[in-house]
Image: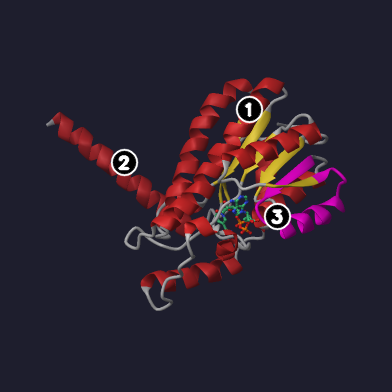
């Protein structure tokens, strides 16, 4: 999508962090924006903030884990704008807990928001974007945790691996239709992701934090530290706008040697296993 002015964007998780920065970046380049979020007061504040940039910024209450709620929010965007071009399936939550510390409530909550939220967004908007024929773009927020499992947050990593996979498949299917797909894989970004428990519905039970002296607790403290000193969300949003313009599938915000080494180790192990299988077939 090369032209942005006058086009429209729908952003989930738009009240905070990366979603709010995306909304701001879109408003700055002349787009009309609908921010969708589960948290009412921050959503209202975000809309007021962005309306200083453009009168065409709106907000809608939306729980991405609920398909009916996403459909209603999509309907509000269609009613307001007529046509929606860019959909950012960005809302997400993190809950600590590795595969050796299984809380089924954590699994359900994280997968319902991070994975099903993306599925619901695609389901609600794809028929519309396909039918209006003006082209469009999906931006699905994954994470570096969708590329390697180093964090040890199993539900979170599993949800983000799935978002990467869905985005790769969707990109191949939609390219011939002139609809782009980007999967956003940030490292640590300065947002409220570590306070995700603020949006945890009661049906998923209480949030349980690990004992701060346990390995999981120590890891969590380190992650909080890294997030607090992380990238400015505005930098991430700038990269996303550029990826939409250039129709790029992957956005990596942290290309440093540590992240690269983790990817090389994982892909290297996979390729080595393929080589071993090939050698086995030859014998
Ligand atoms: N901050 C990081 O370091 C980082 C790194 C990699 C990926 N991410 C991803 O970025 C995305 C945005 O998170 P963020 O870091 O800006 O955190 P954030 O907490 O600042 O923003 C997340 C937003 O999502 C909203 N939200 C939560 N549950 C929702 C639901 N069920 N329905 C609708 N909205 C809901 C929250 O109210 C909040 O406004 C997430 O998908 C997250 O996993 C963040």
In the picture provided, is 209 more to the left or to the right than 191?
left
- Magenta stretch containing residue 52, yes or no? yes
Above or below, 110 against 228 in this view is above
- Image disc number at residue 58: none
Which callout, 2 or 3, points at the residue further toward the start of the chain? 3
Above or below, 120 against 107 in this view is above
Dot 1 and dot 2 residues touching (CB under 8 Å): no
Dot 2 and dot 3 residues touching (CB under 8 Å): no
Ligand 1 appears in which quadrant? bottom right
- Image disc number at residue 179: 1
At 37% from the left edge and 72% from the top edge, which residue is drawn?
A: 215
Above or below, 245 against 263 in this view is above
| Residue carrying label 2 | 271
Q: SS at mark 1?
A: strand
Q: Position of residue 71 (x, y in %)?
A: 64, 36
How far apart marks 1 and 3 lie (CA) works out to 26 Å
Which callout, 1 or 3, points at the residue further toward the start of the chain? 3
Instruction: Specify whether tag 3 is near ligand 1 (CB below 8 Å).
Output: yes
* Residue range (magenta): 32-57
Q: Position of residue 236 (x, y in %)?
A: 65, 52
Q: Position of residue 160 (x, y in %)?
A: 48, 48
């Amino acid at each position: 999508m090369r032209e942005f002015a006058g086009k429209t964007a729908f952003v989930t998780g738009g009240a905070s962090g990366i979603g709010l920065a995306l909304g701001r970046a879109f408003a700055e380049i002349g787009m009309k924006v609908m921010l969708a979020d589960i948290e009412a007061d921050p959503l209202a504040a975000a809309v007021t903030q962005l309306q200083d940039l453009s009168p065409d910024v709106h907000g809608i209450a939306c729980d991405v884990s609920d398909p009916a709620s996403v459909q209603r929010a999509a309907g509000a965007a269609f009613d307001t704008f007529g046509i929606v071009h860019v959909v950012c399936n960005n809302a997400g939550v993190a809950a600590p807990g590795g595969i050796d510390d299984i809380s089924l409530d954590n699994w359900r909550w994280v997968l319902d928001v991070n994975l099903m939220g993306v599925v619901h967004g695609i389901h609600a908007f794809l028929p519309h974007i396909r039918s209006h024929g003006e082209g469009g773009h999906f931006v699905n927020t994954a994470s570096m945790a969708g590329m390697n499992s180093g964090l040890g947050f199993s539900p979170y990593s599993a949800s983000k691996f799935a978002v990467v996979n869905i985005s790769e498949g969707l990109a191949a299917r939609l390219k011939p239709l002139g609809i782009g797909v980007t999967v956003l894989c940030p490292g640590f970004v300065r947002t409220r992701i570590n306070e995700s428990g603020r949006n945890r519905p009661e049906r998923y039970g209480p949030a349980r934090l690990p004992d701060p002296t346990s390995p999981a607790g120590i890891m969590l403290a380190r992650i909080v530290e890294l997030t607090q000193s992380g990238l400015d969300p505005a930098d991430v949003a700038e990269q996303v706008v550029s990826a939409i313009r250039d129709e790029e599938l992957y956005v990596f915000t942290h290309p440093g040697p540590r992240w690269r080494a983790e990817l090389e180790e994982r892909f290297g192990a996979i390729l080595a296993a393929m080589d071993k299988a090939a050698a086995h077939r030859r014998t």
